[in-house]
Amino acid sequence: MKFEPDTLASAHEQMAIVKAQSTGGFFTNYFRQEMVGPQILTAATARSVLLANDEHDFFRLYFFTNDLADLEQILRDVDFPGDVVASYLTKAADENIAAFQQS
C-alpha cells in the first residue's frame, strides 16, 4: 500500500466514513491539528486512515481507525514516504493501542 497525494478535506471525509461505520468507538491521534507542511498524503482502508504531513525534513503521521487489527496491518504494509514521526498521547496507559506501538 502506498501513500497518495490528497487534500485535508478529503482526509476528513474518509475519517467521517470510518467514524460513521464504527460500532465500538474509534482511536486517533488526529484532532484537526494545523497542517504545517504543504504536502498531505493519505493511505486508507475501509476501517483506517493514515495521514502524513510533510514537515520540512520528515513526515508527521496521524491515524484514525475503528479497528485496531486493521491499523496494525496498514502500519506494517504501507510504504512510508520518508522519515516519519508519530505520537499518541494519553492521560493514562492505554492497552488498546498496543497495535500502534508494536507497528
Image (tube, grey):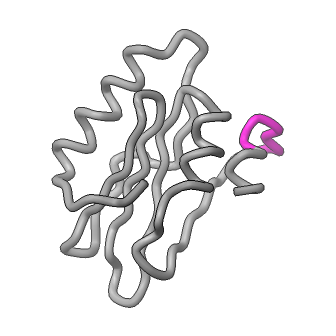
The answer to which image quadrant residue 71 occupies is top right
Going 78% across and 45% down the picture, which residue do you hit?
Answer: 98
Q: Position of residue 15 (x, y in %)?
A: 35, 34
Q: Is residue 38 left or right of residue 81?
A: left
The residue segment tinted magenta is 92-97
Image quadrant where one finds the N terminus? bottom left
- Residue 41, percent across and down? 29, 61
Q: Residue at x 33, y 67 (%)?
A: 53
Left or right for 61, reference 17? right
Q: Is residue 24 magenta?
A: no
Q: Residue shown at 40%/25% (left/top)?
A: 18
Vertical placement of 89 versus 39: above or below? above
Q: Residue furthest bottom?
A: 57
**Residue at (50, 81) in percent of width and height:** 83
The C terminus lies in quadrant? bottom right
Q: How many marks?
A: 0
Horizontal side of 97 relative to 82 (left or right) equals right
Left or right side of 78 for 32: left
Task: Quadrant for residue 86, please give it.
Answer: bottom right
49 over 24 or under it: above or below: below
Seen in the picture, residue 41 relative to 91 is either above or below; the reply is below
Instruction: Estimate the x, y position of residue 70 in percent, counting from the top left.
Output: 59, 35
